[in-house]
Image (cartoon, grey):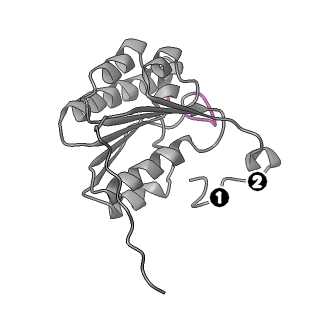
């Protein structure tokens, strides 16, 4: 079979997008990770900071190691605050989120990355682990060509108002509600 030459599109004007992935449905982090993979395919540099996750293994941890040095992956959280028997106090979760937001600000302004993913930052804000001005400061001070992705349920209206693209994942049906445990390689 003959190989077809693929067309590569170039925008007339390059713009760093702010993208919010929110809602109660599955796929917010997965969508962000897909964009990270796509960015690496274009030889862009990606930084991912996880605000809430960190107490459970997920396949992307080792997957991203294989994509180094194009992807830098930072697990900053201690799991989901207040659910699934998480043993850490609110204060410990807030301290971790504060470290993560400082790291995000450093990476945002470093000039080293083309795409910055702030995974579960919307949850961290909603739970009071971060303050709204901290998140808005990141969005407002984003370099013009940096793409910024903010994931997590319950995105604040001020965050969505500042974004170029907002997608709300809506749960229609979920295997978990049918008592099917999370599946390796698909759910984590």
- Residue 154 x %, y %: 58, 24
Q: Residue furthest right?
A: 178
Q: Residues within 10 Å of mark 1 (few under 14, many from 20)?
A: few
Q: Residue at x 39, y 67 (%)?
A: 6
| Residue closer to the observer: 9 or 53 | 9
* Residue in the foreground of this view, choosing between 98 and 41: 41
Q: Is residue 140 magenta?
A: no
119 to 4, vertically: above or below: above
Res. 163 mark: none
Q: CA distance from mark 2 to mark 1?
A: 8 Å
Give the crowd class for mark 2: few <14, some 14-19, many >=20 residues within 10 Å. Answer: few
Q: Above or below — where is 115 with respect to 93?
A: below
State which quadrant residue 106 falls in: top left
In this view, 155 is above or below 35: above
Q: Position of residue 63 (x, y in %)?
A: 41, 61
SS under mark 2 = loop
Label 1, on which residue?
183
Residue at 37% from the left image edge and 57% from the top image edge: 64
State the image coordinates of residue 119 (x, y, percent, origin top left).
45, 37
Q: Residue at x 42, y 75 (%)?
A: 4
Query: Over which residues does the magenta segment extend?
Result: 82-88
* Secondary structure beneath label 1: loop
* Mark 2 and mark 1 residues within 8 Å of each other at the beta carbon: yes
- Describe residue 122's horizontal placement relative to residue 84 as left or right: left
Left or right of 86? Residue 180 is: right
Magenta: main secondary structure equals loop
Residue projecting furthest to the bottom: 1
Tell me, yes or no, whether the highlighted magenta stretch contains residue 85. yes
Q: What residue sits right under mark 2 in the picture?
A: 180
Tally of numbered discs:
2
Viewer-proximal residue, 176 or 85?
176
């Amino acid at each position: 079979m003959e190989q077809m030459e693929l067309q590569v599109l170039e925008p007339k004007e390059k713009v760093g997008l702010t993208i919010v992935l929110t809602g109660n449905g599955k796929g917010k982090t997965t969508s962000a990770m897909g964009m990270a993979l796509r960015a690496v395919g274009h030889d862009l540099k990606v930084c991912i900071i996880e605000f809430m996750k960190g107490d459970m293994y997920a396949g992307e941890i080792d997957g991203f190691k294989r994509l180094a040095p194009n992807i830098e992956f930072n697990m900053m959280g201690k799991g989901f605050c207040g659910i699934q028997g998480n043993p850490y106090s609110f204060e410990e979760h807030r301290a971790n989120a504060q470290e993560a937001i400082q790291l995000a600000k450093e990476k945002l302004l470093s000039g080293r990355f083309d795409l910055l993913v702030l995974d579960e930052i919307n949850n961290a804000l909603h739970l009071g682990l971060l303050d709204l001005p901290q998140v808005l400061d990141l969005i407002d001070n984003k370099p013009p060509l940096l793409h910024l992705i903010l994931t997590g349920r319950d995105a604040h209206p001020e965050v969505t108002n500042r974004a170029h693209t907002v997608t709300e994942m809506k749960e229609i049906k979920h295997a978990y509600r049918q008592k099917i445990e999370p599946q390796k390689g698909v759910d984590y």
